[in-house]
């Protein structure tokens, strides 16, 4: 593979005059992190304690980070229900400032037999032609008895072989282990096969068949068929492989007023009622999005918090899930005689009609962005950052930057950041430092986003639950909300916290302040959280949010 190069915004040989406003802002943030140029290319030095081979001091430490922007869920003509060429998707991602992306095409016999290899050849050529862009190959797995998931591997000699072997052996659609199968897809057999699939991936990493591989559950509550115990089972099967879920789905343009109809159109295409295959324990409110985010993530004290309250990291992401872009004028091309997806693994190239076509999606990076903290630039660095949970996400380009550190007041350590774990004593005073860089330019819709508030959410850590279908964390709530309306540039919020009798975690959330109300578990838990929109009236550009991964605090007594 061609040697990876720094993105233009991180390359000191690229003149600042040639960067767009987004690139200028990101270069400024990189300089602030002390990673510009060679420091970013080679990776930041280890902290002194770790470099000397000692364990971390009480409170831990964390390297300086730069955040790279990506999307782990995009589709091209190599998916049977998509539309765009590989080049169209890659070009759009570059145009909207993505550093990394994953082509995770839908599983299909045509894909496994033909399409995966054909796309791999395009990816290899694209990596060589544009070494500044990180392009992963992945698969959208139909989880046996459940929803979908992104699977992707580090570049290497076996990346496409891993995906096709997995597809043929473990994909629920190809095996008939999905909705509509003769036996209900929630059978013990199907659930066990999903766990076995994740364990198989972990074994391929352990033996070195591939350098790395990751799994993320996609749109978990779209159909309500991902039960809490299944999510926990997947995580526990290989927590270093199954690292999280989409906090917000793609298809964020689905409810633009006047576009797709006024009766059922919901952001994310969460337009489903519970079915016979849905898990019966979810409330009716679980089947729509809130501020564009999945109910499992948006509900303070809900399913995501219930998993975090066990004291184990489970990350959230956001992405485009691009199939058909809103207001786009391209349509699918026509099949030549005798050809179809099953015998080619690839759709015909699309044709421009000059007339808007149906669609719900945005281009990769146009609206949804997942930011991953890395110490250097490269494929494995992005995967390591995702695994470590150094992740925050935003919609509508709400923020240019976010850096979060939790420190013990009694020492000078840099503290820990997103995904990290801080060891403290009972009663110890802590400070949460939240450094925000506000949007410096209009977003792709022409709006200059303005952050209105930053919320601190805190939850007690109680360890593994007895009932693995528990979806509530009753001790999680919003504990602080900071009004930041009108603040611009880069500023740091200093939020005092005190360690109590038990371990806990904190996570962050914020929005443009346009649409909010009492959370689903009551105003005492979440006084001004995201709310569901009326069908067909969910303009995503005027209801934008950011979320961060948690930081854990282990309380160790007096």
Image: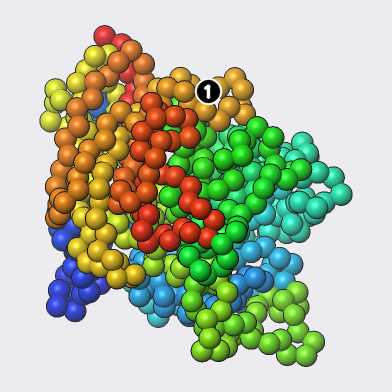
Quarter residue 286 falls in: top right
Image height of 464 relative to 52, above or below: above
Question: Which residue is at a point 45% across and 70% down the rendered structure image?
Answer: 363
Q: Mark 1 points at which residue?
A: 464
Q: Which of 474 and 272 is in front in this view?
A: 272
Question: Which residue is at a point 68% across and 87% down the rendered structure image?
Answer: 334
Q: Which of 511 and 371 is in front in this view?
A: 511
Q: How crowded is mark 1: few (under 14 residues within 10 Å), some or many (20 or more)?
A: some
Q: Position of residue 429 (x, y in %)?
A: 19, 21
Q: Position of residue 385 (x, y in %)?
A: 37, 49
Image height of 18 relative to 440, above or below: below
Image quadrant containing the N terminus:
bottom left
User: In this orientation, does residue 310 appear?
Assistant: no
Question: Which residue is at a point 72% across and 76% down the rendered structure image?
Answer: 341
Colour pattern: rainbow
User: In this orientation, does residue 235 appear?
Assistant: yes
Query: On the rendered structure, is 480 left or right of 117?
Result: left
Image height of 242 relative to 462, above or below: below
Q: Position of residue 478 (x, y in %)?
A: 34, 31
Quarter residue 67 falls in: bottom left
Image quadrant containing the C terminus:
top left
Q: Position of residue 354 (x, y in %)?
A: 51, 89
Q: Nearer the viewer, residue 91 or 62?
A: 91
In the displayed orientation, state which residue is furthest to the top. Answer: 558
Q: How many marks?
A: 1
Question: In what element is the residue under mark 1?
Answer: loop
Q: Which of 354 and 315 is in front in this view?
A: 354
Question: Which residue is at a point 47% across and 23% down the rendered structure image?
Answer: 474
């Amino acid at each position: 593979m061609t040697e990876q190069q720094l993105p233009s915004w991180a390359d000191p040989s690229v003149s600042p005059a040639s960067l767009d406003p987004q690139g200028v802002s990101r270069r400024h943030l990189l300089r602030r992190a002390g990673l510009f140029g060679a420091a970013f290319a080679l990776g930041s030095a280890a902290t002194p304690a770790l470099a000397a081979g000692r364990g971390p001091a009480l409170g831990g430490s964390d390297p300086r980070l730069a955040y790279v922007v990506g999307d782990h869920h995009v589709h091209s003509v190599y998916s049977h229900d998509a539309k765009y060429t590989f080049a169209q998707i890659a070009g759009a991602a570059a145009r909207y400032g993505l550093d990394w992306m994953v082509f995770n095409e839908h599983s299909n016999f045509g894909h496994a037999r033909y399409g995966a290899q054909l796309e791999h050849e395009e990816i290899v050529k694209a990596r060589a032609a544009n070494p500044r862009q990180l392009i992963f190959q992945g698969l959208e797995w139909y989880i046996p008895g459940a929803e979908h998931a992104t699977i992707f591997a580090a570049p290497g000699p076996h990346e496409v072989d891993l995906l096709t072997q997995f597809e043929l052996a473990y994909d629920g659609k190809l095996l008939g282990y999905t909705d509509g199968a003769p036996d209900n897809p929630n059978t013990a057999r199907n659930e066990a096969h999903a766990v076995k699939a994740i364990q198989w991936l972990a074994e391929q990493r352990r033996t070195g068949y591939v350098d790395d591989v990751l799994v993320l559950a996609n749109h978990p509550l779209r159909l309500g068929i991902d039960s809490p115990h299944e999510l926990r089972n997947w995580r526990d099967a290989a927590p270093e492989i199954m690292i999280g879920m989409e906090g917000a789905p793609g298809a964020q343009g689905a409810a633009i007023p006047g576009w797709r109809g006024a009766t059922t159109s919901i952001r994310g295409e969460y337009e489903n009622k519970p079915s016979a295959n849905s898990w019966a324990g979810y409330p009716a409110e679980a089947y729509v999005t809130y501020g564009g985010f999945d109910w499992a993530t948006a509900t303070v004290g809900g399913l995501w918090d219930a998993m975090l309250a066990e004291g184990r990291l489970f990350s959230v992401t956001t992405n485009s899930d691009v199939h058909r872009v809103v207001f786009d004028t391209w349509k699918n091309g026509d099949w030549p005689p005798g050809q179809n997806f099953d015998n080619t693994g690839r759709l015909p190239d699309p044709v421009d009609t000059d007339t808007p076509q149906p669609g719900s999606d945005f281009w990769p990076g146009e609206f949804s962005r997942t930011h991953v903290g890395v110490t250097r630039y490269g494929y494995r660095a992005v995967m390591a950052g995702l695994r470590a949970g150094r992740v925050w996400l935003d919609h509508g380009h709400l923020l240019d930057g976010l850096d979060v550190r939790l420190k013990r007041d009694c020492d000078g350590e840099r503290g820990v950041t997103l995904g990290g774990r801080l060891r403290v004593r009972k009663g110890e005073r802590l400070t949460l430092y939240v450094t925000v860089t506000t949007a410096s330019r209009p977003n792709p819709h022409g709006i200059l986003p303005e952050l209105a508030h930053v919320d601190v959410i805190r939850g007690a850590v109680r360890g593994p639950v007895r009932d693995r279908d528990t979806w509530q964390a009753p001790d999680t709530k919003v504990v602080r909300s900071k009004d930041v309306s009108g603040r611009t540039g880069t500023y740091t919020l200093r939020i005092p916290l005190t360690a109590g009798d038990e371990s806990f975690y904190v996570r962050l959330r914020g929005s443009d302040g346009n649409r909010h109300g009492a959370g689903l578990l009551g105003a005492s838990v979440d006084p001004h959280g995201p709310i569901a929109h009326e069908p067909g009236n969910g303009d995503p550009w005027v209801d934008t949010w950011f979320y961060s991964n948690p930081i854990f605090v282990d309380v160790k007594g007096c």
